[in-house]
């Protein structure tokens, strides 16, 4: 039997990465760098795929990464390697320093401010290695798939997947900061196919957790995938119209993703966002709120420090519909004349304030309109806010699902979609670091037949 890890050596592995990072920074400084930072990581995983009861793939992964950035004054150079032997590390130092010597000065470059470095490192309960071997993963994948295939009407399978993953990372810089992180992420998924006289449909379901004991019942994943697949049979197109649209929680998360892109530093200092200069302004209804909570135990986006070592803190992003701040690392903050928000590398555990309505209640609130369960395509412009994407889902009448729909396009402007948000459901999807329920938008253009 082959296991993801037979012995937890994570602390020793972190010690080795930390020692290597600190030594590399010393050598970079000796080579003339005024500042330096290192990110090093080791990711270990097991991935098993099963289809129609047979093993398709078994993959063991062990990926390493080592990235160095040096600053010669305000000239910057970066280099990376996946090989941690001494010669490769020295070559990485030489390359980074050579690049920095020939780049132009950038007044915004440099490490994050020293007084912003994290100094407290509480245990956020992110480390839960899954002691599963290949045989156990195969059996689990078969159980998930069999549960779905046992449902009448399911005619085929695209297979199930079992993933167990562990990640170790170290960030160090010449301020003397050294941060270590270890985390686990595991997932189960299955995709099924159903067919009838009108054609075939495919859908899936999955779960993603830090600790394997937190998974939903494996067979329930298969049954959920089957239920979703069968519900799509008989899909039809609908005529072009304007109507209210309810985004299922897993799709609503993408709407929040567009908002994050529009208020992130890179888009703002390039002035390529429809929300430039909107801090302190109302962009959503007065009841709407988003809070960032990076220190949630076992959270999928929890972290004590960001990608630059800056301490993370609980902070609101939107209060009473008003944008409270942007999402900034040090570089973008300096370009904007602001301060880092501890978001170098992204956001950590966003919580959207929900209403009282569960999914059934949100359907009743929708009344007659479109429920979107999947979006496709890249038709979203952060520059203008224009939104146009292919979609599928269900037409709803009088608060009840009437029939499935496909091959339609939904369109509006994000500015209007956010301003005309009617409600957020209590049906929160917890499989992400962005936690939100379904979103009901007052009106969008639906293009069909």
Image: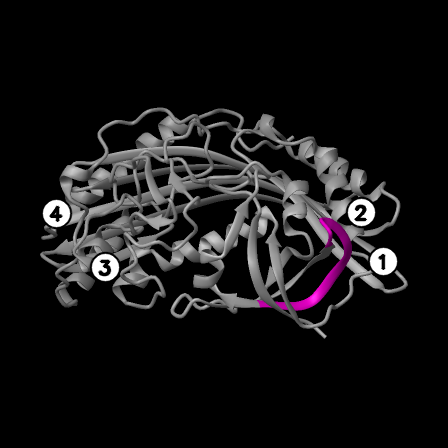
- Observer-nearest residue: 96 or 150? 150
Label 2 to label 1: alpha-carbon separation? 16 Å
Image quadrant for the N terminus?
top right
Q: Position of residue 339 (x, y in %)?
A: 19, 48
Q: How many numbered dots are placed on residues in this image?
A: 4
Upstream in the sequence, badge 2 or badge 1? Answer: 2
Question: In the drawing, does residue 204 fall left or right of residue 343?
Answer: right
Q: Nearer the viewer, mark 2 or mark 4?
A: 2
The answer to whether mark 2 and mark 1 are in CB contact below 8 A is no
Pointer 4 residue: 29
Question: In the drawing, does residue 344 fall left or right of residue 220?
Answer: left
Q: Position of residue 136 (x, y in %)?
A: 68, 31
- The image quarter in which residue 308 lies: top left
- The image quarter in which residue 26 lies: top left
Upstream in the sequence, badge 1 or badge 4? Answer: 4
Pointer 1 residue: 195
Mark 2 residue element: loop
Q: Position of residue 287 (x, y in %)?
A: 44, 44
Upstream in the sequence, badge 3 or badge 4? Answer: 4
Q: Nearer the viewer, mark 3 or mark 2?
A: 2
Pointer 3 residue: 95
At label 3, counting other C-alpha atoms closer than 10 Å, the crowd grade (few under 14, some 14-19, many 20 or more) is some
Upstream in the sequence, badge 2 or badge 4? Answer: 4
At label 2, counting other C-alpha atoms closer than 10 Å, the crowd grade (few under 14, some 14-19, many 20 or more) is some
Please tell me the numbered disc located at residue 52. 2
Question: In the drawing, does residue 310 fall left or right of residue 386?
Answer: left
| Residue at horizontal 21 percent and vertical 54 percent from the top | 333
The answer to whether mark 3 and mark 4 are in CB contact below 8 A is no
Label 3 to label 4: alpha-carbon separation? 14 Å
Q: Is residue 409 on the magenta stretch?
A: yes
| Residue 57 visible in the shown view | no
């Amino acid at each position: 039997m082959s296991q993801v890890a037979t012995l937890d050596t994570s602390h020793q592995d972190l010690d080795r990465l930390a020692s290597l990072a600190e030594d590399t920074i010393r050598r970079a400084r000796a080579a003339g760098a005024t500042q330096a930072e290192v990110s090093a990581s080791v990711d270990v995983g097991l991935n098993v795929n099963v289809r129609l009861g047979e093993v398709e793939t078994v993959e063991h992964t062990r990926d390493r990464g080592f990235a160095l950035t040096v600053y010669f004054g305000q000239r910057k150079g970066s280099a990376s390697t996946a090989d941690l032997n001494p010669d490769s590390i020295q070559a990485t130092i030489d390359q980074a320093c050579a690049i920095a010597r020939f780049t132009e000065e950038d007044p915004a470059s440099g490490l994050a401010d020293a007084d912003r470095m994290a100094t407290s490192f509480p245990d956020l309960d992110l480390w839960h290695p899954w002691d599963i071997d290949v045989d156990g993963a195969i059996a689990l994948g078969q159980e998930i798939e069999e549960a779905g295939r046992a449902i009448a009407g399911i005619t085929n399978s695209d297979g199930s997947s079992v993933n167990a993953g562990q990640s170790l990372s170290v960030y160090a810089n010449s301020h003397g900061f050294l941060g270590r992180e270890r985390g686990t992420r595991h997932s189960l998924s299955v995709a099924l196919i159903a067919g009838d006289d009108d054609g075939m449909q495919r859908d899936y379901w999955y779960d993603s957790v830090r600790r394997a004991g937190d998974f939903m019942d494996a067979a329930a994943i298969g049954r959920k995938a089957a239920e979703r697949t069968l519900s799509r049979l008989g899909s039809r197109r609908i005529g072009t119209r304007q109507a209210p649209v309810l985004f299922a929680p897993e799709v609503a998360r993408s709407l929040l993703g567009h908002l994050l892109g529009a208020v992130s530093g890179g888009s703002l200092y390039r002035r390529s966002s429809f929300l430039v200069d909107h801090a302190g302004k109302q962009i959503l209804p007065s009841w709407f709120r988003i809070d960032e909570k990076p220190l949630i135990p076992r959270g999928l986006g929890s972290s004590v420090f960001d990608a630059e070592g800056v301490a993370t803190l609980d902070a609101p992003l939107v209060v009473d519909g008003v944008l409270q701040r942007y999402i900034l690392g040090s570089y973008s903050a300096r370009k904007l004349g602001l301060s880092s928000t501890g978001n170098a590398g992204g956001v950590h555990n966003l919580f959207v304030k929900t209403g009282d309505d569960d999914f059934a209640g949100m359907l009743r609130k929708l009344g007659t309109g479109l429920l979107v369960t999947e979006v496709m395509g890249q038709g979203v412009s952060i520059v203008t806010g224009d939104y146009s994407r292919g979609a599928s889902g269900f037409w709803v009448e009088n608060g009840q699902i009437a029939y499935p729909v496909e091959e339609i396009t939904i369109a509006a402007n994000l500015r209007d979609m956010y301003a005309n948000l009617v409600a957020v459901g209590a049906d929160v999807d917890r499989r992400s670091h962005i936690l939100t329920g379904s979103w009901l938008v007052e009106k969008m253009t639906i293009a069909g037949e």
